[in-house]
Amino acid sequence: MKGKRLILMGPPGGGKGTQAQRLQETFGLVQLSTGDMLRAAVAAGTPVGKQAKALMENGQLVSDDVVVGIIDERLDADDVKNGFILDGFPRTVVQAERLDALLHRKGMGLDAVIELQVPDALIVERITGRYTCANCGKGYHDSFSKPLVEGVCDNCGCTDFKRRADDNADTVGHRLTAYHEQTAPLMPYYDGQGLLHVIDGTLPIDVVTTELKRILGA
Ligand code: AMP
């Protein structure tokens, strides 16, 4: 597992972030979430953040140039040498082609692309109910995954939680449209490279993790 390089694909609310966090904790693979990086840029008010803010709030994709630039730079850091999980990137065929080119330039290859399949009908409930600990980032859900003690994070004891600005029913529709129109064409792209594996993302979180580990030979 050490040194593996993977892409987690799937719709918003499909479980990519949850599974990436688990692989990061268990195997030291670094989770590279363009969504997290862009949210940090918005919070910091950087030029990239200012450019991305309205698009993100509306559930639309940020430009390919911006996200490819972010990933290109991030892949030069030392911590990715032990392997990484791309979460939320690439999201368009142009991003995938440019990722191939930059990985080639850096002498890196991909080990697997894993698609978590979840039907649209389940996504709205998953997304509108989710929240995270404001301190450690552990994820929870109003219906499926509450803290053991109400209002207290299981992991760090913090009592502050936050919800994403784009996790509302209106924006989810736009995010799903973006996914089907712009990101779904990546599955045949990676299948053609012999890298694609599909997991039923409606299975319990632990079962999905076990399946992921099996695919990765861990
Ligand atoms: P996520 O956290 O992956 O759901 O991403 C949240 C939002 O950030 C998306 O709805 C997009 O507006 C933007 N975003 C994240 N990753 C990308 C990407 N690879 N390409 C374009 N926009 C992105």
Image (spheres, helix red, strand yellow):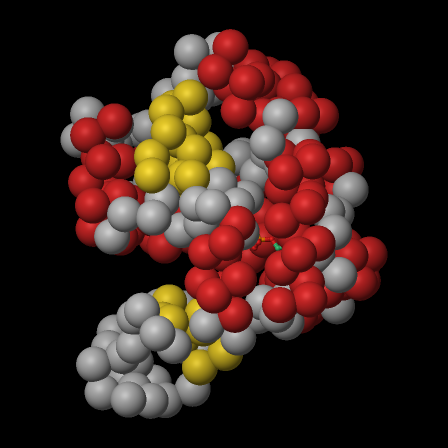
Q: Is residue 95 above or below residue 131?
A: above
Q: Is residue 175 above or below residue 98?
A: below
Can residue 13 be seen here?
Answer: no
Q: Which image quadrant for residue 181?
A: top right
Residue 52 or residue 169, whichever sits in front: 169
Residue drawn at point x = 43 percent, y = 45 percent: 118
Q: Which residue, as the protein is rendered here, is positioned at the far front?
A: 121
* Quadrant of the image containing the N terminus: top left
| Picture coordinates of residue 8, whole percent (x, y) | 44, 37
Residue drawn at point x = 65 percent, y = 52 percent: 175
* Quadrant of the image containing the C terminus: top left
Q: How many marks?
A: 0
Residue drawn at point x = 57 percent, y = 38 percent: 89
Residue drawn at point x = 69 percent, y = 44 percent: 178
| Picture coordinates of residue 20, whole percent (x, y) | 37, 47
| Picture coordinates of residue 79, whole percent (x, y) | 40, 41
Q: Is residue 117 above or below residue 107?
A: below
| Picture coordinates of residue 28, whole percent (x, y) | 28, 44
Q: Is residue 202 above or below residue 140?
A: above
With 59 as the anchor, is 164 left or right in this view? Answer: left
With 4 as the anchor, is 164 left or right in this view? Answer: right
Can residue 202 be seen here?
Answer: yes
